[in-house]
Amino acid sequence: MKKQHIFFVIAGIVLAFASCKNPEVGGSSPCTTTFTDSSDSHPKAATYQNLIDHYTEKGLPGITLLIKDNNGLWIGSSGKADIENNVDMAPCTVSKVASITKMFVGTLTLMLVDEGVLDLDAKISTFLPADMVDKIANADEATLRQVMNHTSGIYDVVSDQSFYLDILNNPEQHWTQESILEHVYGKDAAFPCGTDQGYSNTNYLLISLIIEETTGKTHQALLNEKIINPLNLQNTYYFVHDALPAYTAQGYYDLYNSGNILNLTNYNTGSGNGYTGLYMDVRDLQLFIEGLFVNKVLLSDSMLNIMQTFTDVDPENGRAFGLGIYKDFLNGAPDEYGLGHRGRDLAYSADAFYFPKNGTVMAFIINYGTNGNSAVGDLFFEFRDELEAEIFN
């Protein structure tokens, strides 16, 4: 999900609802890390640990960071998974990875293209019910490719104030694709189809519907069948379809930009509908990134090249859109970039990237939201910039 300022419009009424809901995700429990790494011997062990400690001391609740480079695998954590219950963040902590869900759904889509089930240049109107297409601006013109690389112009549901008001009225509701689309119907397109680029969560909701319409299977079942199970991702959960483990991190956000962060763990921003909802640990993020870009066991070489057909750089966010992925971290030399996806939600953030120049895999999860401006949120972007500098140092 992309950064929005809409939270400040609705902030004044959040606490009224926060005090009367029964949490679906309860307090976090400690977990036991079972995978091994070379954290003690990695030459940058102290550098990376000091980095994450610095930013939890400055105010980010909890961080887990994984780096795999030619010196081995380093995993470290800092801060709290659950502030209220004093539970430490750990490498095995599961947390919401938000829009990284789109990279999974995008990969699944390209697998189906490779199998001849889907056609990237077919209009999405050929896959979706006519009464749905008629109510979504640009849905009659956009191709599957344009939906995947955010050049469709289709209205982004996350920009809709009424959508967030509905979340606040019933924070833990289990949204369906159809109930989310009620907030898209009749809204103007962001731009004429194919003339610009603009991130839209609605694009990947529609992709989840296209997958289901063409295969006769749920997209979550296919994610398990084609990606999660083959890669043996043992700590990956697709909420709301899967129950979350007890060692899921709480999610926080400084709603009033006052320095006081609130626990917003149970505010469901549409999980399980193609654009958000995956919860993972950093180890599973690593295994997915390696499966996609390093070991190349998910897509054929030709399809992986198509995935890496990028738009121009988005001037607002400094990234270029591929098909289900970003070309990101573009502040340095032309060959110093990452392939992967960002994850941003109301109370959680994550990144998962592969850096081809030096063969580095990077993944982090932070249980703080960045879909709005806050002083604590600024720390997140400082952390990300410092981490990029270390990866290319």
Image (cartoon, rainbow, N blue to C red):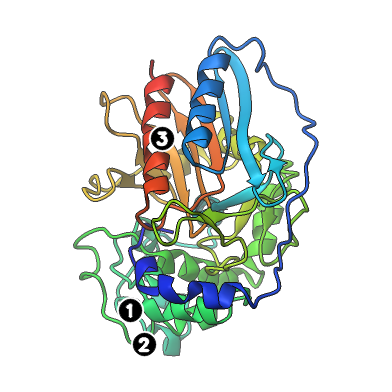
**Rendered view: 69 above or below 130:** above
Q: Does the image show residue 220?
A: yes
Q: Which residue is mark 1?
A: 140
- Residue situated in front as seen by the camera: 7 or 326: 7
Q: Is residue 37 left or right of residue 60?
A: right
Q: Secondary structure at mark 3?
A: helix
Q: Residue 166 location, x and y as percent? A: 50, 81
Task: In the rendered view, tell whether residue 323 sits above or below residue 158.
Answer: above
The residue under label 3 is which amino acid type? Arg
First of labels 3, 1 by sequence position? 1
Near-viewer residue (323 or 18) = 18
Q: Which residue is mark 3?
A: 384
Disc 2 marks a residue whose amino acid type is Asp
Is residue 293 visible to the viewer in this orientation of the structure? no
* Circle on res. 270: none
* Amino acid tagged 1: Asp
Q: Do tag 1 and tag 2 residues touch (Cβ < 8 Å)? A: yes
* Residue at mark 2: 134
The structure residue drawn at horizontal position 45% and vertical position 45%, both measured from the top left corner, is 341
Q: Nearer the viewer, mark 2 or mark 3?
A: 3
Question: How far apart are labels 1 and 2 at the CA level?
Answer: 7 Å
